[in-house]
Image: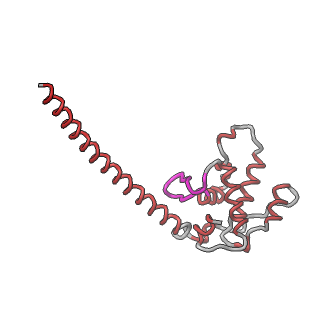
Amino acid sequence: MAPEYALWGYLTNKADVYSFGIFALEIAAGKDNMKFRPSDKYVCLLDWALVLQQKGRLMELVDPKLGPDFDKEEAIKMIKIALLCTNPSPALRPAMSAVVSMLEGHLDIQDLVMDPSIYGDEYRFRSLKDKYDELQLQSSNEAQTLTDSMVTTEIGSSSTSTNDLYQINRHSV
């Protein structure tokens, strides 16, 4: 449920379907939705998947660790179902019973009704991009503070060890 809330700012009665879609996408791609950024243009795995879907290149999502020996049709089926489940419009998401039927092959996979371009590039995942950039900046600031602290500690340690050497030498004489 958290990925839907993070992206759109609200939860719906089909949040479980959305979460399943994210989970299925992560399985097919072998990547974490929130940690995967193929470039600065994309904020998460789902963002990248939607672009690849528009370009007709869904096979690029499949985990390369699978090697050549996997059922390509099953992989594409899983990704298409995942994208149906993550539709921003809860009304356009399938019910979980329909998802199970699609996975089992008892129901044809619906065409993706959503067109990601209707949200416009400047609006797609904007809040998530802003949060990601904020976390990156915070992380960068924390890393700098840690580095500054380590430099101060090393300088302090060096003067202490120099002082210790002075004391040892003074007593030796």
Vertical position of residue 158 compared to residue 26: above or below: above
Bounds of the magenta span? 32-45
Farthest residue, direction right: 106
Quadrant occupied by the C terminus: top left
| Residue 2, quarter of picture | bottom right
| Residue 48: x %, y % from top left | 59, 56
| Residue 96: x %, y % from top left | 79, 65
Vertical position of residue 57 compared to residue 92: above or below: above
Residue in view at x 66 percent, y 58 percent: 53
| Residue 164, quarter of picture | top left
Q: Nearer the viewer, residue 168 or 66?
A: 168
Farthest residue, direction top: 173
Q: How many marks?
A: 0
Residue in view at x 54 percent, y 70 percent: 123
Farthest residue, direction front: 171
Q: Nearer the viewer, residue 89 or 145?
A: 145
Q: How is the image coloured?
A: secondary structure
| Residue 119: x %, y % from top left | 59, 71
Asked whether residue 42 is drawn in magenta, I would say yes
| Residue 87: x %, y % from top left | 68, 67
138 with respect to 112 (left or right): left
Residue in view at x 68 percent, y 56 percent: 23
| Residue 65, quarter of picture | top right
146 with respect to 94 (left or right): left
Q: Main secondary structure of the magenta part?
A: loop
Asked whether residue 36 is drawn in magenta, I would say yes
Vertical position of residue 128 compared to residue 72: above or below: below
Quadrant occupied by the N terminus: bottom right
Residue in view at x 74 percent, y 54 percent: 78
